[in-house]
Every structure is written in C-alpha cells, then in structure tokens.
C-alpha cells in the first residue's frame, strides 16, 4: 500500500509541474508578444490623416451587374462606397443615372447613406459600405440581337474641409530687428484628406 501511495504522489506532482510549465510558457508568449513596440502603431499616432486629397470613391463589385444580362432576367448592381477622406460624410445619396427604362428597370434609383466615418487614428482607411440595387431586364426590340448601354453613378453628400495655415504678421515690417517670422512669396499646399 505504501508503494502505491508514492506512485500516486509522484503522478500528482508531475501533473502539477506540467501545468505550471504550460502556464509559464503561455505567460511568456503573451508578455513577449504584448510588449513589443509596433512601428505601425508608432507611425499611426504621428500620421496626419487630414493631409492629401481624397474624395468619396464609388466602384462596382465584380459581376454585379453581370457582363451579360438576358431578357426577362433579374440582376443586381452592387456599389462599393468608400470614404478615404479625413472627414465624415453625412446625408449621402447614390443615384443610378442614364439607364434606359425601355430595357431595364432598376429600383430604387436612389439609395441613402446616412453616415460614413472619415479617416482617423482608430479607422485609418475610413468607412466603407455596400449598396445594392435590384434590376430587371426587359425584352429587346424585334430583330435585335443585343443592346449595349452605359450608366453612371452619381453621389451627393455633405462633408467639410478645413484649411489651417500659419500666417506671418509683422507689425513692424520695415524695422531693422527680426520679429521672428519671414514672409514667403508663394506657398503650395498638399491638399485635404
């Protein structure tokens, strides 16, 4: 009986030691990965999201609408709406313009975008959403084999632009002493995010 108890004690001690080793390894991995300095994070805090030129981007998803639409068939138009600018977009509307209603019925012709967040520290690429339009193809005219048509996407939205510049104002422009600023002849700006 004494021998079995020693074997049991050894097994319990080994299990406890194995658990301690596993927990120590997990803690070591977490502390190693968690404490590393990320160069991306450092740069993100210093990045000026309001610099550059960016506008609302509209693009169609692949195969939406399909390349070929057959008479009396349904199709979808899916628009990817991306806001890479530095400011939020509100009260947005996307319209489909230029579709010939004799051949295609698309509904609704206009969809609303209530809010799209602009670029910032928490969202460096800005918000993106997808808008879906449902469509139905009609019949071709007699003896027609195909009909090719173009359409346009039109976006209307509210946003803002900020302009900030340092201006040199010297009350004594013709004095001999240095007032701390220099008047520049020309300036160029890199745009607005």
Image: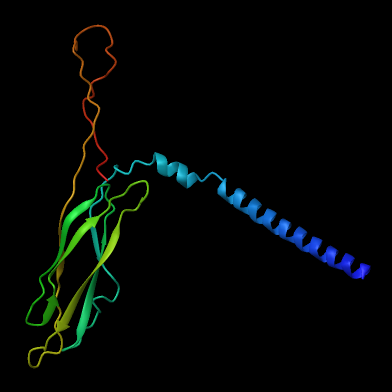
Q: Quadrant of residue 101?
A: bottom left
How was this image coloured? rainbow
Q: Nearer the viewer, residue 47 or 92?
A: 92
Residue 65 appears left or right of 148: right
Q: Quadrant of residue 52?
A: top left
Q: Residue at x 7, y 93 (%)?
A: 142
Q: Nearer the viewer, residue 139 or 145?
A: 139
Image quadrant in which the N terminus is located: bottom right
- Asked if residue 180 is positioned above or below residue 136 in the image, the reply reads above
Outermost residue on the right side: it is 2
Q: Residue at x 10, y 71 (%)?
A: 98
Q: Quadrant of residue 191?
A: top left
Residue 28 appears left or right of 73: right
Q: Position of residue 77 (x, y in %)?
A: 22, 74
- Asked if residue 15 is positioned above or below residue 162 in the image, the reply reads below
Outermost residue on the front side: it is 1
């Amino acid at each position: 009986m004494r021998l079995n108890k020693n074997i049991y004690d050894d097994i319990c001690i080994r299990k406890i030691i194995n658990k301690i080793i596993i927990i120590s390894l997990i803690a070591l991995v977490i502390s190693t990965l968690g404490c590393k300095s990320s160069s991306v994070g450092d740069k993100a805090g210093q990045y000026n999201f309001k610099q550059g030129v960016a506008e609302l981007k509209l693009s169609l998803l692949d195969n939406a609408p399909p390349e070929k639409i057959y008479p009396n068939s349904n199709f979808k138009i899916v628009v990817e709406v991306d806001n890479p600018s530095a400011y939020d977009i509100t009260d947005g509307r996307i319209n489909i313009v230029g579709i010939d209603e004799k051949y295609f019925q698309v509904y609704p012709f206009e969809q609303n975008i209530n809010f799209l967040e602009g670029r910032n520290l928490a969202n460096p690429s800005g918000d993106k959403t997808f808008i879906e339009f449902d469509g139905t193809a009609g019949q071709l005219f007699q003896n027609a084999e195909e009909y090719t048509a173009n359409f346009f996407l039109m976006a209307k939205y509210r946003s803002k632009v900020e302009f900030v510049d340092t201006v040199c104002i010297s009350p004594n422009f013709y004095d001999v002493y240095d007032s701390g600023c220099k008047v520049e002849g020309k300036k160029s700006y890199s745009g607005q995010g």
